[in-house]
Amino acid sequence: MNSTSLCVSCPHHDSGFCGTLLGSEDARRNQRFQTLRAGAQIAVRNQAAADVLVLCTGWAFRYLQLADGRRQILKFMLPGDVLSPATIFQKNYPSSVKALTDVMLSGFPRTAIRERCAIGPGAPSAVASTSIAEMRDVTELATILGQCSAEERIAYLLLRLMSGIAARNVIRDNRYPFPLRQQHIADAVGLTPVHVSRVFGLLRERGVLTMSEGVLTVFDVPQLERLGSLK
Amino acid sequence: MNSTSLCVSCPHHDSGFCGTLLGSEDARRNQRFQTLRAGAQIAVRNQAAADVLVLCTGWAFRYLQLADGRRQILKFMLPGDVLSPATIFQKNYPSSVKALTDVMLSGFPRTAIRERCAIGPGAPSAVASTSIAEMRDVTELATILGQCSAEERIAYLLLRLMSGIAARNVIRDNRYPFPLRQQHIADAVGLTPVHVSRVFGLLRERGVLTMSEGVLTVFDVPQLERLGSLK
DNA sequence: CGGCAGTTTGATGTTACTCAATTTAAGTGG
DNA sequence: CCACTTAAATTGAGTAACATCAAACTGCCG
């Protein structure tokens, strides 16, 4: 419990990526914090990254934007996630990041992480497994985007989010805290907000789920899995 | 020129990822070769990988397949490419690999690469930059698939392939050796072969390019770039 | 109460898919 | 070298999925 004393409102520093790195006194000493409002731009593609940023509280998302304004959301980040894992290895952000809700971030100097990689066997494998998970996620996303229908894409996204949320919260009655607007979902699955609304309407009619007041309620998980699982 | 003596028909072992690793006598001694026919299955998702495979000659592609047979091609590999970079870090293939043409492969024991990572500063950064490039590629692919039209997707794919081919061959008159069937292109950009054919027809009519006898000829590169560049 | 952002609904347009037939190209064996 | 076979590419007609445009509706906040 000693690492949480440095970051009271960040319950995720005990485990996973962040926990491994915080094992070093040195890394902790160099840790930096900041708080941002919903909608704030956290990082811009190609910009230099001073620190490796980790999300402590709130939601954020990573995306790539085209010249004409279209954007592809690549991943929604939850507390404990590294906002841009590539910044461990290179100075520049390969994609942009925005805060979806109010967020708190902590930053680690890149050098501290890499030094720690050079020492123990714990840190390098934590970095490797983070990278592999990132790779798997975006690979699956590409597959879903290339091969699947609107319904399947949305089901897939919801299932992924649900498992992420469930890993960090106690879920009762299949009610998930859910701050996304339909515009975000649209940008993540490559559809228009209008069409996202229609698909949600259908799923609601069929008694699969509802969304309101920042809560996603899933009545029929098996049905959703039938639509949205990759296997 | 001493490293090529081990692998006469593989001109790429002098540079890049492969060249860095082959600097070690030990890695060279453990190198294993194999030859496969076009269409051969090189790796299957979740299967254990004995070695880290590098493509010496020919073309291959990496893909993810869904239960109902749909498949997303994630990347076309050219000589010098690691077939599945993730196998440096983990035992199992995260995606499947097939030979597009007849191929020659060489395999390095995972341990040899990782030992070498622990020593010099060259190898870890070679591995890191390979991983980062992989990440960037699949991220761009997801963006193209999510946000772009059929024409844009195909133009993007062609441009990517062209730069890969040009990096390994002398290109005269914008004629690129090109072994892909339209089915491969379809699976890579998330369209049906029929629609791919229509788009090619359009591009041909407009005098942008032609494809025949395993050669892609591009008459109007700027036009193609206008369609298919991400920026 | 009025205004604003987000969602829903309807009508219509476009893009890409499906099915099926035809043409072209590429081998293969005589 | 030429018929025969087979795979790949092209073309056409009809359809389904998703986009676009615009209007109406909802909930929220000052």
Image (spheres, coloured by chain):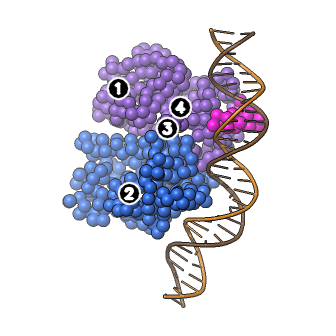
Chain colours: A purple, B blue, C brown, D orange
The image quadrant of residue C24 is bottom right
Q: CA distance from mark 4 to mark 1?
A: 22 Å
Provide the residue span drawn in magenta. A192-210
Image coords of residue A196 (percent x, y): 66, 36
Where disc 3 sits, the SS reads loop
- Whether callout 3 and callout 4 share a subunit is answered yes
Q: Foreground residue, D30 or A138?
A: D30
Where disc 2 sits, the SS reads helix
Question: Label 3 amino acid?
Answer: Leu
Question: Label 2 amino acid?
Answer: Ile
Mark 4 residue crowding within 10 angstroms, few (<14) / some (14–19) / many (20+): many
According to the picture, the residue beneath numbered tag 1 turns out to be A50
- Whether callout 2 and callout 4 share a subunit is answered no
Q: Chain of mark 3?
A: A
According to the picture, the residue beneath numbered tag 2 turns out to be B165
Give the answer, above or below, for where C17 lies relative to A164.
Answer: below
User: Which residue is most to the left?
Assistant: B2
Q: CA distance from mark 1 to mark 2?
A: 36 Å
Question: Label 4 amino acid?
Answer: Phe
Q: Foreground residue, A197 or A162?
A: A197
According to the picture, the residue beneath numbered tag 3 turns out to be A66
- Whether callout 4 and callout 1 share a subunit is answered yes
Q: Name which residue lies at 45% across and 49% down.
A: B225
- Which sits earlier in the primary sequence, circle 3 or circle 4? 3
Give the answer, above or below, for where A145 lies relative to A94.
Answer: below
According to the picture, the residue beneath numbered tag 4 turns out to be A76
Q: CA distance from mark 3 to mark 2?
A: 25 Å
How many labels were placed on the picture?
4
